[in-house]
Amino acid sequence: MEPTTILIILAIFLVAILYSSVGHGGASGYLAVMALMAVAPEITRPTALTLNLFVASIATVQYYRAGHFSWRLFLPFAAASIPMAYLGGSIQLPTNVYKIVLGVVLLLAAARLAWNLSGGDDDVKEPPIWLALIIGAALGLLSGLVGVGGGIFLTPLLLLIAWAKAKTAAGVSALFIFVNSAAGLAGAWGKMPQLPGEVYFWIGAAVIGGLIGSTLGAQKMGTLTLRRVLAVVLVFAGGKLILV
């Protein structure tokens, strides 16, 4: 096995631990790893969405079992995001445009990871359905276009506007990521290139990392320092995509 392949496997493993600990699938991290390792852009989007499916499903189960989930909060966001994620997945952006859009998304994701957000226990209110639908649609379209699940943006919104406690936000975001990733992959299916043979090793690393991270995140865990280290990696990857 080549050194580059081993590095990617280890990086995906670490990304899955850190992201799943806060209820995320890790797509922005996987995209950053692949960008830094010069993986072809046409492969990065479907690969990241595939890895997302595995990690987000694990995180969903763990947070749901721990009682950190709300169907009432999840459904309006997902109802609008799923068709838009499918639409976004069916759109193939020119490589130069895709790299810039992805670079901006990675920089925003870095800011999210570096920022310690915590949901209060009081004054949590339900979002207006019309606003949840608009937000869900926008995040769904972005998810399909770029190859992320949208949770990296949904979680801070839920916390900043006091629509959920921290762990409930993580649980809702985990399933939100799963359904968007599935819809995005479905939309891209007809134009999707064959994934590299190493993807099975990447999936294995993501699954093991997702099990570890989501178990810790659903019960305890404080990973702010590690997430800030990952944020630096995302900044480098995002900057590389935009500038090179």
Image (cartoon, rainbow, N blue to C red):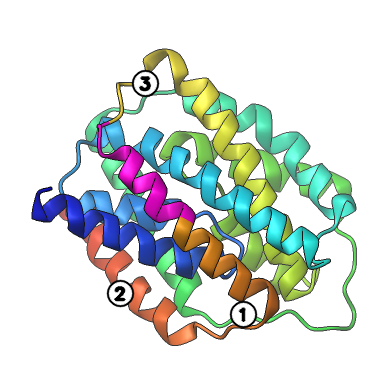
Residue drawn at (50%, 82%), measured in percent from left and top?
Answer: 223
Left or right for 1, reference 156: left
**Which image quadrant for residue 145?**
top left
- Identify the mark at residue 192; answer none if there is no mark: 3
Residue 243, percent across and down?
A: 16, 54
Residue 84, percent across and down?
A: 62, 30
Quick check: 82 above or below 205?
A: above
Q: Nearer the viewer, residue 146 or 174?
A: 174
- Going by the numbered disc 2, the residue's amino acid type is Val
Residue 30, percent across and down?
A: 36, 53
Q: Which residues are magenta?
A: 196-207
Q: Which residue is mark 2?
A: 232
Q: What's the distance in space between the residues labelled 1 and 3, CA to CA? A: 36 Å
Residue 138 visible (yes or no): no
SS category of the residue bearing label 1: loop
Which SS type dominates the magenta stretch? helix
Asked whether residue 198 is drawn in magenta, I would say yes
Q: Nearer the viewer, residue 89 or 134?
A: 89
